[in-house]
Image (spheres, rainbow, N blue to C red):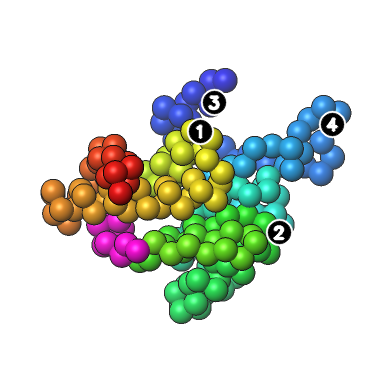
Amino acid sequence: VELVEALLTGKTRQKHPIGFTLDAGPGEPTPPQLPPLIVDADGLNALADLEAGPTLLPPLSILTPHPGEMARLTGLSTREINANRWQVARQFAAEWKQVVVLKGAHTAIAHPDGALAISPFADPALATAGSGDVLAGTIVGLLAQGLSTWDAARAGVYLHALAGSLAAEAIGPALLASDMAHRLPRALDLLRRA
């Protein structure tokens, strides 16, 4: 409990890898029995170090890599990924049986069944430090409200980008991730009224 509280409140600077084994004891959950996870940043780097990588996660978890993280996960170069972003997202979503949110200008959201959604936003303001944390938190919040991982990923990407655009409009390009987070309620209100 202390570890979870420390992770949620940010009162730890340590990395705590969480893994699964194939020989789970009696009554211990296996990945298919666990709820989907949202994996970003160091979680993605930890997966890249494992041979089975994202296939170890519960089905329909959400991975939110930027092209550099996607390169580590796939073995492709960032140049190859950026040249074929939509195809790469779709291919690995199917291969890993996970929802893939390949971040960048016009973020690609891919479902393992081949469905693909593309964000209409390409705002450089979204490339600020901590922006990915705001995105992951937005998606988690939508999952907590009962959305499927597919719907939460698509809505989360849209709300996050809209909040970033609202922040850039109000503050200019030198914004902080917290400026985006503070504009999420306004973005949600605008989306509900659309």
Q: Which residue is mark 1?
A: 144
Of badges 2 and 1, the one in the foreground is 1
User: Could you tell me the amino acid type at mark 3?
Assistant: Leu
Q: Classify mark 4: helix, strand or loop.
A: loop
Q: Which residue lies at the image location 21% right of the left edge and 49% below the top edge?
A: 166
Q: Which residue is mark 2?
A: 51
Indicate the secondary structure of the residue bearing disc 3: helix
Of all residues, the one furthest to the top in this rendering is 1
Q: Which residue is mark 3?
A: 3
Q: Position of residue 18 (x, y in %)?
A: 63, 39
**Going from the N terminus, do you reach mark 2 or mark 1 first?**
2
Separation of marks 1 and 4 at Cα, in angstroms: 29 Å
Question: What amino acid type should be assigned to the residue bearing mark 2?
Answer: Glu
Query: Which residue corresponds to the image point at 81% horizontal and 44% vertical from the top-left?
Result: 22
User: Mark 1 or 3, which is nearer the eye?
Assistant: 1
Mark pair 1, 3: CA separation: 21 Å
The span picked out in magenta is 120-130
Instruction: Give the residue pinned by disc 4.
Output: 25
Tell me the residue at 56%/44% (across/down).
148
Snapshot quadrant of residue 89: bottom right
- Point out residue 3 in the picture as x, y percentages from the top left corner: 54, 26
Three-letter code for the amino acid on which mark 1 is drawn: Ala
Q: Is residue 89 above or below residue 168?
A: below
Badge 1 density bin: few <14, some 14–19, many ≥20, Cα 10 Å: few
Q: Earlier in the sequence, mark 2 or mark 4?
A: 4
